[in-house]
């Protein structure tokens, strides 16, 4: 069925019809599959954070235990009674396995995935350049999903077995971002990069919005927390198999794409796959200000994002006495806002580029400024917001909405400056950015240690604002939308019409010979 749908993208009845139909072509099918892959990746990444709440045996707490580390001076007793009651009235289940893991052991389990994830970024980025991205992405996600299915039995065997399973899941997910970037570089023309890239990476928010509430529902069901990993592991396995069967490395090797769409992509991009025979110009890359601008913006994004999505909820718990994770709508709102705003921004960005209203470089600078100055300002205002829960949630949601601008900013800029090396560049920046993101909870923990007051949190959020401003400002002045001179020269001349006609004859012959 999927093969039949995919083939309709390439079904042609003349050059004019091809031109009309390429507005929705096979590259859109590839984009849709990458979107689902990104969603599955983030589901695998986040489901443990919800499931582990039901996996552990919670200690018997008293009201004094709950309040001793809360900041009661700043917000007095607002919402405190309801918060204490919700914590004391937690119902423990005995029909599923439960484990006596302390907070440090839980931290090891949660972080194991990310250590594996960071470890494979750059190696797979380089391997994908040489051998293609498709199989690394598909097989990596298959490994991730398969070991997701093994999480329940691994937990039953012991904590270390579970940590190993999550670590291997992270190893499998490592190729997802660099390989996705490399495939986008081969399939998507420059004037469609913003919306296609935003569509694919919006899968991260979509997957998170699906994972958080559904993981909670599955954990509370009669099947218990193991069902979280069985359901999502099965979904990821199915996607991996479909992806490996129906997606191709590039337009040159896909017989289902129409002649017009293939030639249109090649005329605008060139044969990017030829870059595998060219060595990586490391010195030129690391001395390139446009690349360094992307690197710094990516690091600032991950640091600020971790503060917004992990430390701001902790601030709400310690200062406002509200656990946002216990409310599905509150926890989903920021991700929904980021998803919707990223899509809107991407269409506007591509229109500005396509209509030649703005250059690619100027467009990237403007949208990245919205994407990083905006959330920086929101997190700063949240620190001085007082005790208003509605305003804090509104600022969190607004901040993530602004943050959607990055997908038309630095996040897709690798493709502008070097389509042939986009996967390698993304592997470098994504690896470094994830390491930078790990410092967010460390900094917050150091400042907040033994004094979770509003004043201490203001210090944390002021520093985050500073990181956003520095990184966004460097990108504003140093970034570029032009293809850099160190990018392998793989641009080809416009394909003559007679060549298109010859390809059309060959393609029609292939279709006649292929089964329906």
Image (spheres, rainbow, N blue to C red):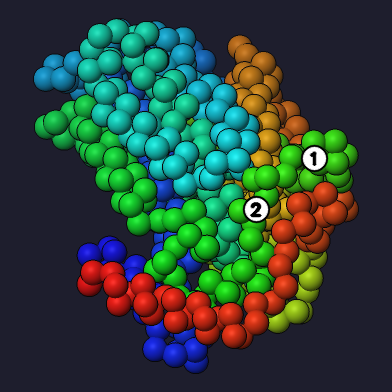
Image height of 58 relative to 266, above or below: above
Residue 467 position within the rendered picture, expressed as x and y whole percent measured from the top left: 76, 37
- Residues 275 and 373: in front is 275
Rendered residue at 51%/63% (across/down): 251
Instruction: Name the side, left or right, on which 90 lies relative to 132.
Output: left
Q: Are marks 1 and 2 in contact (CB under 8 Å)?
A: no
Residue 501 position within the rendered picture, expressed as x and y whole percent measured from the top left: 52, 84
Image height of 156 relative to 426, above or below: above
Q: Nearer the viewer, mark 1 or mark 2?
A: 2
Q: Residue 288's quadrant in the figure?
A: top right
Rendered residue at 44%/31% (across/down): 172
Disc 1 element: loop
Question: Can residue 265 be seen in this snapshot?
Answer: yes
Residue 502 position within the rendered picture, expressed as x and y whole percent measured from the top left: 52, 81
Residue 243 position within the rendered picture, expressed as x and y whole percent measured from the top left: 36, 51
Disc 2 element: helix
Few, some or many C-alpha atoms within 10 Å of disc 1 (few <14, some 14-19, many ≥20)?
few
Which residue is the site of mark 2?
274
Which residue is the site of mark 1?
281
Instruction: Name the side, left or right, on which 293 lies relative to 202.
Output: right
Location of the N terminus by quadrant is bottom left
Few, some or many C-alpha atoms within 10 Å of disc 2 (few <14, some 14-19, many ≥20)?
some
Q: Residue 3's quadrant in the figure?
A: bottom left
Instruction: Name the side, left or right, on which 167 lies relative to 233.
Output: right
Rendered residue at 78%/51% (across/down): 487
Mark earlier in primary sequence (1, 2): 2
Rendered residue at 50%/77% (across/down): 503
């Amino acid at each position: 069925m999927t093969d039949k749908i995919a083939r309709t993208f390439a079904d042609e009845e003349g050059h004019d019809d091809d031109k009309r139909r390429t507005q929705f072509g096979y590259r859109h099918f590839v984009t849709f599959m990458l979107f689902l892959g990104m969603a599955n990746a983030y589901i695998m990444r986040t489901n443990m954070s919800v499931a582990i709440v039901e996996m552990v045996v919670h200690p018997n707490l008293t009201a004094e235990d709950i309040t001793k580390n809360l900041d009661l001076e700043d917000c007095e007793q607002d919402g405190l009674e309801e918060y204490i009651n919700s914590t004391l009235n937690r119902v423990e289940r005995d029909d599923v396995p439960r484990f006596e893991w302390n907070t440090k052991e839980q931290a090891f389990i949660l972080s194991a995935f990310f250590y594996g994830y960071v470890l494979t970024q750059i190696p797979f980025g380089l391997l994908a350049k040489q051998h293609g991205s498709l199989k690394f992405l598909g097989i990596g996600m298959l490994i991730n999903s398969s070991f997701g299915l093994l999480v329940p039995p691994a937990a039953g065997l012991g904590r270390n077995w579970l940590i190993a399973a999550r670590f291997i899941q992270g190893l499998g997910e490592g190729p997802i971002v660099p390989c996705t970037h490399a495939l986008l570089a081969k399939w998507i023309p420059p004037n469609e990069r913003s919306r296609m890239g935003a569509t694919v990476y919006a899968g991260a928010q979509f997957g998170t919005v699906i994972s958080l509430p559904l993981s909670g529902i599955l954990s509370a069901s009669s099947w218990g927390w193991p069902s979280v990993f069985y359901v999502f592991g099965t979904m990821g396995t199915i996607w991996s198999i479909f992806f490996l069967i129906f997606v191709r490395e590039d337009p040159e090797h896909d017989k289902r794409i129409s002649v017009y769409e293939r030639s249109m992509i090649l005329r605008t991009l060139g044969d990017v796959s030829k870059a595998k025979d060219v060595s990586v110009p490391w010195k030129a890359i690391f001395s390139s200000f446009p690349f360094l601008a992307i690197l710094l913006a990516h690091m600032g994004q991950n640091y600020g994002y971790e503060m917004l999505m992990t430390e701001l909820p902790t601030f709400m718990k310690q200062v406002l006495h509200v656990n946002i994770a216990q409310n599905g709508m509150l926890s989903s709102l920021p991700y929904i806002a980021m998803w919707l705003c990223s899509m809107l921004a991407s269409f506007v960005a591509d229109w500005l580029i396509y209509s030649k209203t703005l250059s690619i470089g100027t467009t990237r600078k403007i949208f990245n400024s919205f994407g990083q100055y905006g959330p920086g300002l929101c997190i700063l205002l949240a620190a001085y917001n007082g005790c208003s829960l509605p305003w804090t949630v509104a600022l969190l949601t607004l901040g993530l909405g602004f943050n959607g601008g990055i997908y038309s900013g630095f996040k897709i800029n690798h493709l502008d400056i070097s389509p042939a090396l986009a996967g390698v560049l993304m592997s470098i920046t994504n690896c470094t950015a994830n390491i930078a993101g790990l410092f967010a909870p460390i900094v917050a923990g150091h400042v907040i240690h033994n004094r979770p007051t509003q004043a201490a949190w203001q210090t944390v959020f002021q520093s985050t604002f500073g990181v956003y401003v520095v990184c966004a400002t460097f990108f504003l002045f140093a970034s570029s939308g032009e293809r850099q001179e160190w990018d392998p020269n793989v641009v080809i001349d416009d394909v003559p019409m007679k060549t298109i006609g010859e390809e059309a004859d060959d393609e029609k012959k292939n279709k006649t010979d292929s089964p329906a």
